[in-house]
Image (cartoon, rainbow, N blue to C red):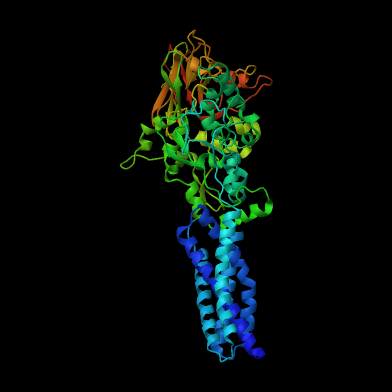
Amino acid sequence: MDSNSRDRAGGGAIVGILAAWTFFELISGGWLRFRFSTGDLDQHVLLGHTLFGFLVLLPALVVIGRAGLSRKTAGARLTSGLLGLGILGAGASGAWLFFVGSSARPTPGRDSHLVTGLSCLCLLLLLALGSRKQPAQRSTERSGLAWLLPLLALAAPFATLGGTVSLWPGESMEIPFPEKYFRRNEPFLGARVQTSHGGAVKIAALANSERCGQCHQAIYKQWLSSSHRQSTISEWYQAQLKLRMETAMASGPAGARFCGACHEPIVTLSGNMDKRGLGPQFPPNRDQGISCTGCHRITGIRDTFGNGSYIYTAHRPYLFENADDPVLASLGRGLLRSKPDAHGKDLMQPFYSSSDVCATCHQVFFKTINGRLYEIQSDYNSWKGSSYSKKGGKTKHQSCQNCHMPLVEAEDPAAIGGKVHSHRFIGANTARPFQTQDHEQLKRTEEFLQQACYLNVQAPAELARGAEARFEVVVTNANVGHTFPGGTTDMVDAWIEAVATDGAGNRLYASGLVDPETLRVDPEAHYYRTYPLDIYGKHLFKRDLWNMFELKEQRLIAPEKSDVALYRFPVPASTQGPIDFRARLRFRRSHQQFTDYSFPDQKMELPITDMASDQARVALIAIEDGEGSASQGGAGN
């Protein structure tokens, strides 16, 4: 055999090898496109597809270049050139998918990778057939080798696939509870959470928010400011949890789990909520609180009664997702970016857009000392009974997510139309962002509060010196889908401050002022709160509500309802007109007694947000002559 024949035979064999590997790329690519999941086999098919995709690229271009230069016909040169472009396109799109990533939805960029791969296979077959038609003197042995090499080449990816499956088996995030775990038959007693497999979950499956943030940078930044992220390290939470573990009827670990299922899913679901169970003493839990997968692996809702009534399932991670080695970790991120479909399905359940999922933790109840059930948080039930929960007609349907997770613009792999649901979880917590000096979160929280309610002052037509002044302040829950205030209503400070002054600036009346020394609000103010008492009639300001016997006060405003506060005071005969009456609705995240208890070693002065205000100016008339005129202040927010 002459040298030209040997070159053609060798070139044909290499083309056959490349055709075999391209065929594997096409088959594995179609598999990944239409049925990929996070199962072990699918994961390794993705790994093999990625490895052989890069492996075939450079030698293919070299062979195609040599073949293109040696072709004598224009058709052969065109086929070789198109094949080179196809391989470049497939390689470039594959590299983009691996290093940059795409959304979890099919896109033209992703489909172009499949199309270019199919084109490469067709062009390689054309070249192989063309080379077979070239006259050449081949020995039977050489011809057999030309067929054997492609067959061996086709077997190589499958052999590699078997090797990677054996070398890197899929990782399970499910583990049994510790041998001496408290009441293993009811591992989460104290809360109502369950795991789908009945055991515990690896910490790596729960405390992984930083890794999530490597791709979801916009969402991660939002979450860092949220109360969800800080649910464990809040001093208010720590103080109450410690008190519960020491004094509640369900004390110790069970008392901790009552709170931990929602506030500390990492330490609770991993089976570490025992006598050491305070979150700040558990390092993986301290800075993550409710982590990304703490919410995004809730796979079922037991009911909407609350107390952590969700079902949790440990996710199937991508290969090397939890690897400590930076090279393997980068490979794992590349696999995830190149095929995020299963990741999206794994971490996004359809019911995440429903208020029901919020109810699992934002409904809280327990038995009090007199054996009655007491709801210390009932936002979901309040919402459920309002027009916000109804669809159709003239009602304004709003879910919890519509208000607390509004769509915001963001560059994020999870974005749809350039927007994601905000993971700041803006609500009424002004305390944490104030404490951490997170000015942006505090500003957004105050703006959120200031659109919640309206306040209107209703003034008399005229006032006479020596008579009694009567002013009404109407507070309307205009834009809150549950009661105002919501959340833990025994903890918040929400009240009306009302002040009347005369024309000389003398104060005629005041209610709801804050003592500058103690920082406590006038006890006779018109509050919006619940005020629990123990069996001795003492205020349970520490929030040890399991000792509650009765409520002294419960004034909450239902959605789209109003409350009226009446203010009366005498108008002295020496009063100079006109009288200015000003009222404002004020809010503080925690009343000062509970804050003082939570910060025993320092004086914590929390910000007070003015949610709404209005004023009225009324002119005075003398009783004896009846002269004068009166003007009524307009209502406004």
List x then y, in percent, for residue 539. Answer: 52, 13
Which of the pair 523/295 is nearer the observer?
295
Can you tell which quarter of the image residue 301 is in?
Answer: top left
Q: Is residue 168 shown left or right of residue 325?
A: left
Counting from the top left corner in percent of width and height, residue 324 is at: 67, 47
> Dividing the picture into quarters, in which one does residue 392 lie?
top left
Image: 81 above or below 39: below
Residue 197 vertical placement versus 163 (above, below): above
Which is nearer the eye, 573 or 429?
Answer: 429
Vertically, is 405 above or below 526?
A: below
Looking at this view, is 377 or 69 the one in front? 69
- Residue 120, position in %: x, y? 53, 75
Quadrant for the N terminus in the image: bottom right
The structure residue drawn at horizontal position 45% and vertical position 15%, both measured from the top left corner, is 551
Residue 558 seen in render: yes
Q: Residue furthest left?
A: 393
Q: How many marks?
A: 0
